[in-house]
Each structure stands twice: as structure tokens, then as C-alpha cells.
Amino acid sequence: MELASRFRDAHVLRSNSPLSDDQIRAVAPSIFAEEKHTSRSARYTYIPTIDVLAGLKKEGFQPFMVCQTKTRDESRSEFTKHLLRLRHADQINGDEANEIILLNSHDGTSSYQMLAGCFRFVCQNGMVRGNTTHDIRLPHKGNIVNDVIEGAFTVLDEFEDMAGEVEGMKALPLTTEEQGIFARHALAAKYEDRAAPITQEQALRARRFEDRGSDLWSTFQRVQENVIKGGLQARTANGRHTRTRPVQGIDQSVRLNRLLWSLAQEMRALKA
């Protein structure tokens, strides 16, 4: 199990076994908020995320990762955005596990949102599927618990398509130039209007032997891990030696993961 860590943007805990309520509370107390934030109107239906999680557990879903955004506004610290990654009992297979990503808040910064994801055991990578048409967003009104459970099973149905996309990436070889193009666009996605402090060769570097393949899936895995996890030797704009920071904020992590997945899909489409 990875212990809870305090980062610049979020508190995070991931485990190899389902998380207990006490473990979740230690990292993300907003999941247990006893009421909505005072900024919410009377039309806002308040149901704590822990009640939704209890309903999901009854249907076979278990949490393996939890994260809560840090906030400078202390009045929101018990209500701020949080994220859970859950697996269903029949979705753990081989080297990867399909995961449902549940986001919510109790201060109006997020509706209930569900995304399809995949967790890769060998490198502890957590991917997010990039197709925005597969989002499920539920406003804070109506029968939230039942709506979220129904949405979770809808996401489960998408995993067969996701598996097909992964197999397609594994079967698609890339030239050295094409791998460089993928890495260059990934770095542009992370650093946006700033110059990347690392090279595309660094972004493509394998951290383990099994990721050294030239296929699209291996390329995607290497780049995703290097860009998201950080820790690479780099130079600042002033020439100072440093190391790249990991991406820890919930919004930043989801955004970048989805961009990388979309980039892989686009390259696959172009090669086809």
C-alpha cells in the first residue's frame, strides 16, 4: 500500500487492497461532509459521497485510490473536490484493472462525474480514457445514489471497447520519428505555453525492461509515466538543475491523462 502523502495540490492514497472508511477519511475528509457548503442554495440536493460509496459497495464496487484537492479557503477544506477510483469484482485481470473514476465535491466545484480508467500494476500508472463523450455527469438533485450506481454500470459496459482500443495500440508499431512526435505533443500538453524542461528523448525513456517496445501502447505507457510521475533530471529556464514535479492535482491529472489517451487514439487513427 502507498501511504497517504501531502503534495502541493492534493492528498493521495492508493492501496493494493480495498480502502477502509478510516483510511479514506484520513486523506479525504470531504467525502464524509455532514452537510453542504454554505454557498449552496436550497435547490442543491445534499447526499454525502460516503453514502454513494456505500451504495456502490453493495453492488460490488470497492475503492482502491482516494484523493482530495487542497484549498487555500479553510471554509471549504471539509467540502472540496475529491476523487475515488473503484474496481468491480469482475474487472481485475492480468496486468491491468479497469477502474471507475468518481469525482464530486460538496462546495459546488464539481457535480458527480464518472469516467472510465485503467490501472497498470507493473508501474502503478492510472490511466483515464480520453473520449469526452463517455463522461457521465450528474447534478446534485434527484435520486443521486441510484443515478450514480446506474452510471457506474454504464461505465462498466464501456470497458470492452476500452480493451479493444488497448489491443489495437499494442498491435501498432511506431517508427522512431513517430514516437518522438508523440512525446513532443505530450510535453506540449503538460507545459502548455512554457518550454519543456526535459527532452522528448527523456519522455520516451523506459523505466523498466517490459516497456521498451516500439508499439503505440508501450510508447504511451513510457511517456505517460514520465510526464505524470516526474522525477526526471531537468533544467529551468535559467539553466538551473532540477527535477520535474509529479502531476498531483485532481483536475490537472485528469486533464493530462485524457489528453494523452486522446493523443494515442489520434495517432492510431492516422496510422490506420
Image (tube, rainbow, N blue to C red):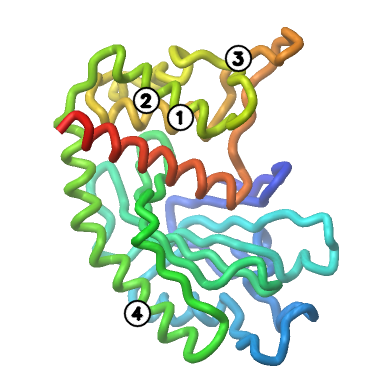
Tell me the distance, in whole angstroms, between the alpha carbons under discs 2 and 3: 20 Å
On the image, numbered disc 3 is attached to which residue?
A: 233
Gap between marks 1 and 2 measured at Cα: 6 Å
Q: Amino acid at mark 3?
A: Gln
Q: Is residue 271 left or right of residue 253?
A: left
Q: Nearer the viewer, residue 159 or 13?
A: 159
Badge 1, how many Cα within 10 Å: few under 14, some, many 20+? many
Quick check: 6 above or below 132?
above
The residue where tag 4 is placed is: 150
- Amino acid on which disc 4 is placed: Glu
Nearer to us: label 2 or label 4:
2
Q: Which residue is mark 1?
A: 186
Identify the residue position indicated by label 2 in the image. Answer: 182
Q: Nearer the viewer, mark 1 or mark 4?
A: 1
Q: Nearer the N terminus, badge 2 or badge 4?
A: 4
Question: Which secondary structure, mark 4?
Answer: helix
**Disc on the earlier residue, 1 or 4:** 4
Find out whether the residues at labels 1 and 2 contact each other: C-beta distance under 8 Å.
yes
Q: Residues within 10 Å of mark 2 (few under 14, many from 20)?
A: many
Residue 254 drawn at (x, y percent): 51, 49
- Residue that appears at 30% across and 71% down: 154
Could you tell me residue 238's position as x and y percent?
76, 11
Q: Nearer the viewer, mark 1 or mark 3?
A: 1
Task: Give the crowd class for mark 4: few <14, some 14-19, many >=20 residues within 10 Å.
Answer: few
Residues at marks 1 and 3, CA–CA distance in whole angstroms: 17 Å
Q: CA distance from mark 4 to mark 3?
A: 45 Å
At 30% from the left edge and 73% from the top edge, which residue is drawn?
Answer: 153
